[in-house]
Image (cartoon, helix red, strand yellow):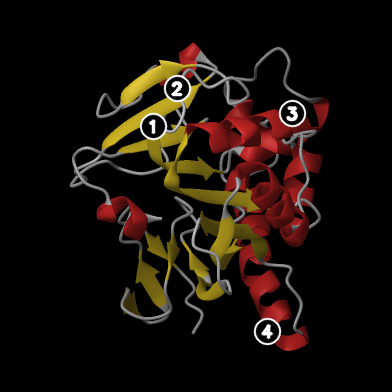
Amino acid sequence: MNDWLCELGQNERVLDLASASGSFSPAGLECSVIAIDEDEAAFQGAPRDRVQVVGRCERLPIASATVDLVICNHALEHVLELNAALDEIGRVLKPAGRLYVAVPNGYGLCDGIYRWLFEGGGHVNRFRRDDLVRLIEARVGVRLAQWQRLYSSFGYLRGVPDLAADPKPDLQVRLKRIARLPRSVVNAAHTGLYVGTRVIDRWFGTSAAIYGWALWFDRAGGSPIENPPFVNVCIHCGSGHPRTGERRSYGSWGCASCGRRNRFWFD
């Protein structure tokens, strides 16, 4: 995603869908960035380094053929009218426009735990990679150029104990009970899932640690390229990192995004 963003110039535009806080930092980019979210409250506290627009993905308040790159970073699983949203993306993209999509595997362990824990958690769509690729290609008019497996940090578990301090009136009973557990127990479960799924995958060739996929689409066509996955994902902020080049010591490593340390490194 960052490589495509850096290629854009001053007269080009990026549309960041359903991510008021931003899917990326515009720092150093020459292009203009438009962030769209249907919830006006979601913009509260969000950085003012992009144009903020209140609107729905199914009815984008954007002129046709005016966007060079659309970013759907963990957004499509939340969209109620998926086909309409994809049609709108196709409408606003320029003839040479590109599309980046990141979604969870709706039938994987990570999304399954998330849906159980948060009783859906706003995920209204479940995706299989090949089915989603065919749907996007048909409705948007683009072709898959690159893709990458995304590994999970199971980071949604870290904030569960905080819910007990200030529980909302509509907080699910299941979450209330789990939030009352000692933080050490929740952290141990979190670490166990993070490490255990990667070890199991390595031993048995499974995909328990896979969160989902990143998909790059353009108009060029050709055979899609699978990029190497980032097995090491920061347990604190969820940023993925390649197997080499990170700050490591005694098996731990420092996240270049948030600066915090992680205890386990997988080569």
Q: Badge 4 local density, few (<14 within 10 Å), some, or many (20+)?
A: few
| Among numbered discs 3 and 4, the one appearing first in the sequence | 3
Q: Say what amino acid the circle numbered 4 marks.
A: Arg
**Mark nearer the viewer, 3 or 2:** 2
Q: CA distance from mark 1 to mark 3?
A: 46 Å
Q: Residue at x 76, y 77 (%)?
A: 206
Q: CA distance from mark 2 to mark 4?
A: 46 Å
Q: Badge 2 local density, few (<14 within 10 Å), some, or many (20+)?
A: some
Q: Residue 218 shows which numbered tag?
A: none
Q: Is residue 121 left or right of residue 119?
A: left
Q: Is residue 264 left or right of residue 1?
A: right
According to the picture, the residue beneath numbered tag 2 turns out to be 62
Q: Is residue 47 left or right of residue 81?
A: left
Q: Say what amino acid the circle numbered 3 marks.
A: Lys
According to the picture, the residue beneath numbered tag 1 turns out to be 66
According to the picture, the residue beneath numbered tag 3 turns out to be 176
| Among numbered discs 4 and 1, the one appearing first in the sequence | 1
According to the picture, the residue beneath numbered tag 4 turns out to be 202
**Residue 105 visible in image:** no
Q: Which residue is outermost to the front?
A: 95
**Do the residues bearing badges 2 and 1 touch, measured as CB atoms within 8 Å?**
yes
| Among numbered discs 2 and 4, the one appearing first in the sequence | 2
* Residue 250 lies in quadrant: bottom left
